[in-house]
């Protein structure tokens, strides 16, 4: 019998990936694209780090392209351990770190390792669109606490307490967040930590944006949990050292989980990309990460301010919040979309086609994201950012006149 798996057929094609691909299609057709879609860092990786990498590759190509153990390059895991000590003041043994093929790989491997079909998982809605796909693929039952712009996208601690039960496998969330860019409050961190310890459940903490913070500081959940054995962190090199196409990240947590992740990684892809593991090692061990981040954050902050001001100026009815971190504005566009009688998915596809302005529909991030749009503010310079938002306003005006 020749067939396509039901499990795969049930998984919807993500509008997220479709719209990111749309950018390339529009460019091929010769359009000037205003790209607010992927969470693409706005600056290339550091020149000096690239130079060190190339010199070392030329000196010893064999070592940079060989197979290696599934847990990842020991030198990189040691450099990560040092990095965690430096930034978070936390001690993590390199044996408790698994190098993975980007945060998304870390998410799938972790959820595979700690859940079985039918287990409940608590998410905050809206959340990174891939969470919903992963949860569906693994046949987990999502429960969700909604967040809204009116409360700075903080989840309600009472909701968290209400939804966690003996059937919950994990509380899974990101901070700083995608798509809302909020950093969780200390109250939420404490609620999650206490509840997870009390109910003996996992905290799966996605820290892909831990270094992309403009005001305030990252919440290190290690500081809130009384038992470190319940915490699994998933980190990415896509944002902080700007190698999203390099596909590299890491998971750190209890040895029993890391062991299973490494076992599964060995079956699925053997290792994370080896050249990139060396690249990240050079970046971290040379102090270039600090230098790169200082420059990048300065640029991103100006872009955030420009995008926020442009929304205030051109789209006064949008409910927009200026976030302290991450890469995205997540304005509530209900006032406009309800008047147009259009949903956010149709709207963003039409906007891309009509004005070559590519933004993501909020509803792919969850029910609570309905009528929002996600606007990446780090990728383009200020003038282009503002121009695209002006075109968005123009598009709405044109539709209103139709
Ligand atoms: C919250 C969050 N987690 C994880 C990822 C995955 O990142 P990557 O697989 O590129 O490391 C992203 C990507 O944008 C994200 O926004």
Image: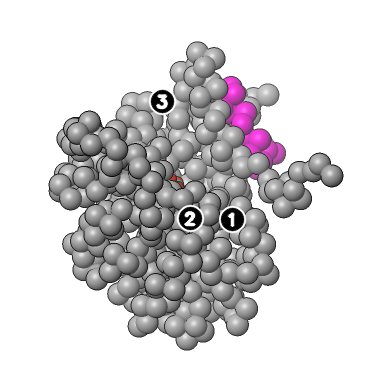
| Cα distance between the residues tagged 2 and 1 | 20 Å
- Of residue 257 and residue 223, the one placed in the foreground of this image is 257
Residue identified by numbered label 1: 134
Mark linked to residue 266:
2
In which image quadrant can residue 13 be found? Answer: top right
Residue identified by numbered label 3: 387
| Cα distance between the residues tagged 3 and 1 | 35 Å
Mark linked to residue 190:
none
Q: Is 67 a magenta residue?
A: no
Horizontal relation, residue 104 to residue 221: left or right = right
Point 21% across, 45% down: residue: 282
In which image quadrant can residue 218 be found? Answer: bottom left
Name which of mark 2 and mark 3 comes first in the sequence.
2
Magenta part of the protein: which range? 336-354
Vertical arrangement, residue 283 with respect to residue 86, above or below: above
Vertical arrangement, residue 29 with respect to residue 326, above or below: above
Query: Whole-percent x and y of residue 300?
Result: 29, 40
Query: Whole-percent x and y of residue 347?
Result: 62, 34
In which quadrant is the N terminus drawn? top right
Q: Residues within 10 Å of mark 2 (few under 14, many from 20)?
A: some
Horizontal relation, residue 296 to residue 3: left or right = left
- Secondary structure at numbered mark 2: helix
Horizontal relation, residue 362 to residue 301: left or right = right
- Of residue 38 and residue 84, the one placed in the foreground of this image is 84
Query: Whole-percent x and y of residue 402?
Result: 68, 24
Point 53% across, 54% down: residue: 267
Viewer-nearest of labels 2 and 1? 2
Name which of mark 2 and mark 1 comes first in the sequence.
1
């Amino acid at each position: 019998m020749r067939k396509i798996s039901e499990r795969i057929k049930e998984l919807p094609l993500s509008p997220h990936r479709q719209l990111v691909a749309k950018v390339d299609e529009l460019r091929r057709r010769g359009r000037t694209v205003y790209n607010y879609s992927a969470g693409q860092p706005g600056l290339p990786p550091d020149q000096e780090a690239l130079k060190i990498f190339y010199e070392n590759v030329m000196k010893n190509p064999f070592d940079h392209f060989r197979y290696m153990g599934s847990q990842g390059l020991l030198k990189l895991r040691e450099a990560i351990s040092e990095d965690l000590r430096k930034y978070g003041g936390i001690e993590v043994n390199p044996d408790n770190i698994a190098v993975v093929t980007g945060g998304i790989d870390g998410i799938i491997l972790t959820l595979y390792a700690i859940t079985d079909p039918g287990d409940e998982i608590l998410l905050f809605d809206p959340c990174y669109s891939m969470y919903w796909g992963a949860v569906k693929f693994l046949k987990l039952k999502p429960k969700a606490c909604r967040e809204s712009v009116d409360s700075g996208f903080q989840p309600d601690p009472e909701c968290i307490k209400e939804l966690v039960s003996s059937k919950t496998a994990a509380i899974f969330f990101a901070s700083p967040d995608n798509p809302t860019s909020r950093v969780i409050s200390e109250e939420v961190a404490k609620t999650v930590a206490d509840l997870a310890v009390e109910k003996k459940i996992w905290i799966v903490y996605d820290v892909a944006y831990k270094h992309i913070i403009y005001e305030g500081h990252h919440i290190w959940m290690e500081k809130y949990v009384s038992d470190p054995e319940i915490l699994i962190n998933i980190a990415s090199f896509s944002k902080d050292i700007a190698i999203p196409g390099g596909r590299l990240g890491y998971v750190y947590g209890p040895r029993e989980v890391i062991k299973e992740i490494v076992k599964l990684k060995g079956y699925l892809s053997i290792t994370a990309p080896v050249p990139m593991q060396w690249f990240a090692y050079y970046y971290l061990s040379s102090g270039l990460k600090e230098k790169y981040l200082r420059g990048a954050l300065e640029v991103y902050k100006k872009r955030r301010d420009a995008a926020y001001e442009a929304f205030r100026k051109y789209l006064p009815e949008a409910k927009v919040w200026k976030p302290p971190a991450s890469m995205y504005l997540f304005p509530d566009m209900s006032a406009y979309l309800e008047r147009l009688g259009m949903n956010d998915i149709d709207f963003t596809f039409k906007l891309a086609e009509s004005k070559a302005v590519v933004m993501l529909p909020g509803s792919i991030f969850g029910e609570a994201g309905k009528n929002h749009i996600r606007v990446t503010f780090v990728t383009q310079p200020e003038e282009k950012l503002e121009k695209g938002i002006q075109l968005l306003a123009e598009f709405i005006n044109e539709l209103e006149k139709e």
